[in-house]
Image (cartoon, grey):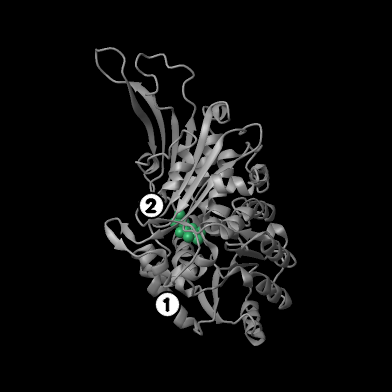
Amino acid sequence: PALADSDFVIFGGTGDLALRKLLPALYLRDRDGQLPAGTRIVAVSRAGLDDAGYRDKVRGSLPAYVGESEPRELDRFVSRLSHVSLDVDDAAAWIELADRLSVDANPVRVFYLAVGPALFGPICRHLDEHGLVDAESRVVLEKPIGHDLASAEAINDAVGAVFDESRIFRIDHYLGKESVQNLLVTRFANTIFEPLWNAHAIDHVQITVSESLGVGSRGGYYDAAGALRDMVQNHLLQLLCLVAMEPPTYVGRETVRDEKLKVLQALRPMTADEITSSAVVGQYTAGLAEGTAVPSYLEDLETESSRTETFVALKAEVCNWRWAGVPFYLRTGKRMKRQYSEIVIAFKQVPHPMFPGSDGEQEPNRLVMHLQPDESIRLHLVAKEPGPGGIRLRPASLDLNFTQAFGAKSPDAYERLLMDVIRGNPTLFMRRDEVEAAWRWIEPIVAHMASGKSPRPYPAGTDGPPAADTLIERDGRAWHESS
Ligand code: BG6
C-alpha cells in the first residue's frame, strides 16, 4: 500500500545531526521518489529563522553531504521545508507550532527529537498538551537515552506517558547500517555457519569500532558521556547482540528485539574486581593522526583536566548454553590508528596438529566481518603452500567484498531508518527493555571507572593504551590486526 503523507517535525532542526545526517537522508530518499508526495518537513529550533532563511541554510549545507543535485530535485525537496522558532518553555511558540501543524495536516506526524535527552520528556508533554499527538503519531529519540539506568527509566516513563511503546523509535544508527543488517543474513540465511556458532567451535569474539577522528566540536556532550556511554552502551552492545542472539522464528518487529534482549539479560554483571581486571579505559594525548600532528583530548576540549575516557577495551561474557566460556572482547576509541569497524569470530585451534612442523604455527580459522569503511566478509583458512617439497601450511582467505560483488554503494544508515519510521516499522529500533537492560549492565562499569584511577594515556594515532593489549594477551590471545 502507498505510504501516507507525513509531517516530519525535527526538534533541533538547525543542529549538527539534522544538517549532517537527517536532511541529507530525507533528501536522498526524496530524490529516489520514496518520500510520499505530500511530505512536509518542519524544523523546530531556537535559531530565529523564517522559512526562507531555513531553506537557504539547507541549500547551503546539503551539497557537502549529497554532492551535486539536479535543480528540480533540490527545489522540490527545499519546498517541503519550513521553520518554527521555539524555546521549549515558551508557551506562545508552542501555540504557533500547533497552528502551523494544523493547517492542511498530514495523516502521520513524526516528531524527531534531535536534542539532548533532558528535553525528551518536556517536549512530549508539550506535544500532548497542544493536542499534537494522535494514534498515528510517532516519536524518534536520538541516543543517549539518559546517562544511567534511573535517568533512562525516567525518560522512558515521560515519553511513554504520551506515546505508546509501538510508536517510540529509539535510534541506534548502527542498526541501520547495511553491514550490520547483513550480520543477520550471514548467520541466518546460510546453513554453514550456524552449526559452528557456539562455544564448541568458537574460541572468542572480538568487536572493534576504531575511529581516527577526535571529539571534534562535540566536546561538551562527549565529556559528560565518554566512550562507555557514547559507544559501548548502544552500538557495541547491539553488535554483540546480533552476533550472540538465537535465531528468531521470523524477522518481525518484536521477534528480533526479543532475542536481542535475552542476550543483554545474559551478560554477566561484573564485580568491582572483575572490572579492574577486565576493563581498560584510556584518553588520547597529542600524537600523529595519519601523519598530521593532532592535539590531545584536553587540548581539544580546552580544559586543564578531565577523567573522561576516549577509549575502552573490555571483556564481556554471555552466560547461556551457547556462549558459556567464550569471551567477547569489545574495543572502541577515538583518535586511534585507523578508522574501521569489524567483528572477528575466532574459531578454536585444531584439536591435534597433524602436519609435520605445524605445531603451534597453525593459525586458527577466523571469520572477519568488516563493517566499515569497506564491507567485506573474509574467512581465514589454512592452505597448503604450493610446491613439490612436502606439505607446508600457509594462511589464505576466502573474500567477499560487497561493493565488488554487488556493485552498489550502501545507503547511509539514516536513509533506511527514517524510511522505517515513516513506514511505522520499529524492528531496527531499540525497545525500552533493551535500552534499560544495556544500562543495567554497563552502569556499574561506568561508576567503577569514574571512581577509580584516571584513564590511561595513549598517543593519538595508536591502538589505545598498552594495557588493552595486555587485557587480551593475558588470556593467550591477541587483537586481530585489521588489513
Ligand atoms: C555516534 C557517536 O553515535 O556514533 C559518535 O556519538 C561516533 O561519537 C559515531 O563518532 C560513530 O558512528 P559511525 O557511523 O561513524 O561509525
The image shows residue 465, relative to residue 451, as above or below, that is: above
- The amino acid type found where label 1 is placed reads Lys
Provide the residue designation for mark 2: 339
- The amino acid type found where label 2 is placed reads Gln
Q: Secondary structure at mark 2?
A: loop
Q: Position of residue 477 (x, y in %)?
A: 46, 35
Quadrant housing the N terminus: bottom right
Q: Position of residue 312 (x, y in %)?
A: 49, 52
Q: Position of residue 397 (x, y in %)?
A: 36, 30
**Mark closer to the observer (1, 2):** 2
Question: Who is closer to the viewer here, 153 or 428?
Answer: 153
Q: Secondary structure at mark 1?
A: helix
Provide the residue designation for mark 1: 57
What residue is at 60 percent from the left and 54 percent from the top? 429
Question: Is the residue under label 2 in contact with that under label 1 (CB below 8 Å)?
Answer: no
Quadrant housing the C terminus: top left
What residue is at 25 percent from the left and 12 percent from the top? 389
The image shows residue 406, relative to residue 174, as above or below, that is: above
